[in-house]
Image: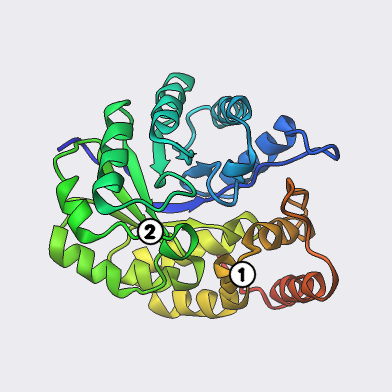
Amino acid sequence: MGKTPDWTGVFPAATTQFAADYAIDLSATQGVLDALIRDGVHGLIVMGTVGENNSLLGDEKRQVLAAAVEVVAGRVPVIVGVSEMTTPAAAAFARDAEAIGADGLMVLPAMVYVPQPAELLSHFRTVAGSTALPIMLYNNPPAYRVNIGIETLEALADVPNIVAIKESAPDTRRFTDLHNALGDRYHLLAGLDDVALEGLLLGATGWVSGLTNAFPAESVALVAAVARGDLATALAIYRWFMPLLHLDADHDLVQSIKLAEKIMGRGSERVRPPRLPLAGARRDTVTAMVERAVATRPMIS
């Protein structure tokens, strides 16, 4: 097996920033990435779900990745989402991402079509075979209507550059089942914000997080507390954070996270249609949640 990269700690699923005409604002996107690094995150997920991967054209994706690699300048790993309609398109983007300078890939099942297990296996093998980069598979059954089952992961165990799983199933039993079936073959990362602590306690060594975009210091402090065995501090932060963390499981998570990011002075709430910024009662609710979090945020050192 290939050497597993050190994908531990907090990896925010970073936002892609847009101008008023919905063109990508590369400078602002670099700004949010740089701010997250300065606030102590351990890596970046670029163009995941929160980064609106599937709202971007192919050339735009490559521009965003190049801008990210430029501003990060090797300070932390840059892992880029691979989320395409077809397997050949995913393999082509994986090759280009390696050439542009990504440190790793977060590979999703092909979009829209719901594959059978053999098709899912073929997709992942083909993408992995197109690049030498280490790969994190992204399992999110509620969002993408397919579960990367243990049988599929067992069948992929001979692929050396598939090294990690971002687990976003809401059932935390998956972490134990994966460990029992596969041992330490795959690096596990918690991928759903409102079960992140449970995932970390059950063996995940990293957290791919949406709400870290708005509250990076608290996210880093939570994971650090778990790492040093300080469960009391981890619980205090987690319980404070939980109302916002629930947003990561909602259908409008991108808009909610971007609104929180804006309120915290870290980015714009612009999203690319068909998404629209939150409005009305929903906007008021999320705004009140963020403001309450600010007013009650825990003291961290």
Q: Residue at x 46, y 28 (%)?
A: 93
Q: Position of residue 194 (x, y in %)?
A: 50, 72
Residue 23 appears left or right of 145: right
Q: Residue at x 62, y 72 (%)?
A: 244
Quarter of the image where one finds residue 182: bottom left
| Precedes in sequence: disc 2 or disc 1 | 2
Looking at the rendered structure, the secondary structure element under dot 1 is helix
Can residue 7 be seen in the rendering of this structure?
no
| Amino acid, disc 1 | Leu
Q: Which image quarter holds the C terminus?
A: bottom right
Residues under labels 2 and 1: Cα distance?
21 Å
- Residue, disc 2: 146
Q: Which image quarter holds the N terminus?
A: top left
Q: Position of residue 117 (x, y in %)?
A: 26, 52
Q: Nearer the viewer, residue 8 or 111?
A: 111
Residue 135 appears left or right of 82: left
Q: Position of residue 236 (x, y in %)?
A: 51, 79
Q: Position of residue 234 (x, y in %)?
A: 45, 74
Can residue 252 be seen in the rendering of this structure?
yes
Q: Nearer the viewer, residue 178 or 145?
A: 145
- Residue, disc 1: 247
